[in-house]
Image (cartoon, grey):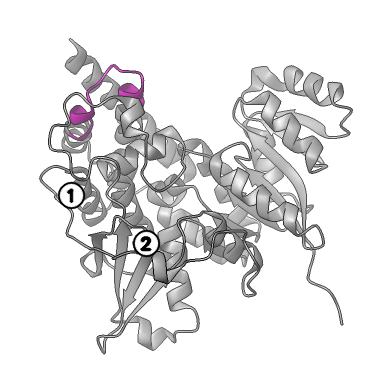
Amino acid sequence: MAGPLMRNITLLGATGSVGASALDIIARYPERYRVHAVTAQSNVDDLADIAVKFSADIAVIGNDDLERPLRDALNARGARTIARAGRHALIEVANTPNCDTVLAAIVGSAGLEPTLAAAESGKRLLLANKEAIVCAGALLMAAVQRGGGSLLPVDSEHNAIHQCLSGVRATERAGVRLVLTASGGPFLNRDDLDEVTPDQACAHPKWVMGRKISVDSATLMNKGLEVIEASWLFGIPADRIDIVIHPQSVIHSMVEFADGSVLAQMGSPDMRTPLAYALAWPERIASGAKRLDFAHAGPLTFEAPDRRRFRCLDYAYAALGRGGGASVVLNAANEIAVQAFLEQRLRFTEIAPTIEQVLESYDPPPPQSFDDVIEIDREARERAGDCVMEKIR
């Protein structure tokens, strides 16, 4: 009997938390997975260590100025890995015929172009980069269709929905309602948010994530972006996508069918579970995640999100409903506001008003190309930067 198909993988964003979880699974199955290329934006030493450990063919650093330091770091470790740098190198390793699977885990809009390139070239695309589909949902889905590959969501919520809908006929999908669960972040039961610090906002009670996405979880913008993402991934309008706060993070999302039945995907809060599902699909493999012990899981609770305190949710729904380039504006304004908060130039409670101000001032048409997305993104960032400066003054 033939063994499992060997997959050659490019990891876009190998040094982040999602990349680390993926590498943990890959290391468990050397007969299934081989690392072709790994990338990072500026973390030279960690990227070189990963390249050596997994015998990667190519390592790409996003910052052009760091190609020589990366080459030196690889040489110092005795690696045969080729060092590359910059935007074109990221695109090249995303669409090269030398790999068949691409994990898109670059944080922010920087991951958009290589993600589109991977989709266009027919790869199995494991999507962990929200911005690619939030900013360019129509472009990305069209690229997947043209390329003839597959798109598998890695976000735990969308991966859960994918699992719940697996094998469901198209006719049965027509009337489904999606329920995305949210942990509520670190400030679920805190009323005074004016003086919270970046470290407090990044102290997620359940998930280990990067600082930007941790702040998004604290504002619930993360869940707003996921509504937009779910709409594109599954072809479901916003009025059939609900959000429920579920602090235990045991149920990762649910699908309600026309007959009233609800399917839920459950498991320990560990990114290795959705990654293992996406890497091995349609098979299943052990992920290394802790088994869910129902006898000791405790009560599971649910509540509606407080949209008065967490206004970013409404802005995300509004951007999805408005269409055009509104989602690009939403994402760009959020990135600028979150970065300003992390740099302690903006209060936590000023993130949402900054996003609202940019959305009200800028309503671009739908992007028809990657260049359109970049131009809308650039303009929105400039306006958000101006808003931040006004608040500082």
Rendering coords of residue 235 (x, y %): 37, 69
Check the image and report above or below for 138 versus 346.
below
Task: Name the residue located 60 percent from the left edge and 56 percent from the top edge.
Answer: 120
* Front residue (pair 185, 159): 185
* Front residue (pair 351, 229): 351
Task: Name the residue located 50 percent from the left edge and 84 percent from the top edge.
Answer: 167
Kind of residue sitting beneath label 1? Asp
Range of the magenta residues? 339-352
Rendering coords of residue 72 (x, y %): 80, 19
Res 354 → quadrant: top left
Report the residue marked by disc 1.
314
Which quarter of the rendered picture does the C terminus lie within?
top left
Seen in the image, is 80 located left or right of residue 48? Answer: right
Outermost residue, front side: 296
Residue 103 among those drawn in magenta: no
Please tell me how crowded label 2 is: few (under 14), some (14-19), or many (20+) other residues with Cα within 10 Å: many
Which quarter of the rendered picture does the N terminus lie within?
bottom right
| Number of numbered discs visible in the structure rendering | 2
Rendering coords of residue 156 (x, y %): 45, 58
Report the residue marked by disc 2.
230
Per the picture, the main secondary structure of the magenta-coloured stretch is helix
Question: Circle 1 sits in a helix, a strand or a loop, which is it?
Answer: helix
Q: Are marks 1 and 2 in contact (CB under 8 Å)?
A: no
Task: Name the residue located 38 percent from the left edge and 88 percent from the top edge.
Answer: 171
Seen in the image, is 280 located left or right of residue 108? Answer: right
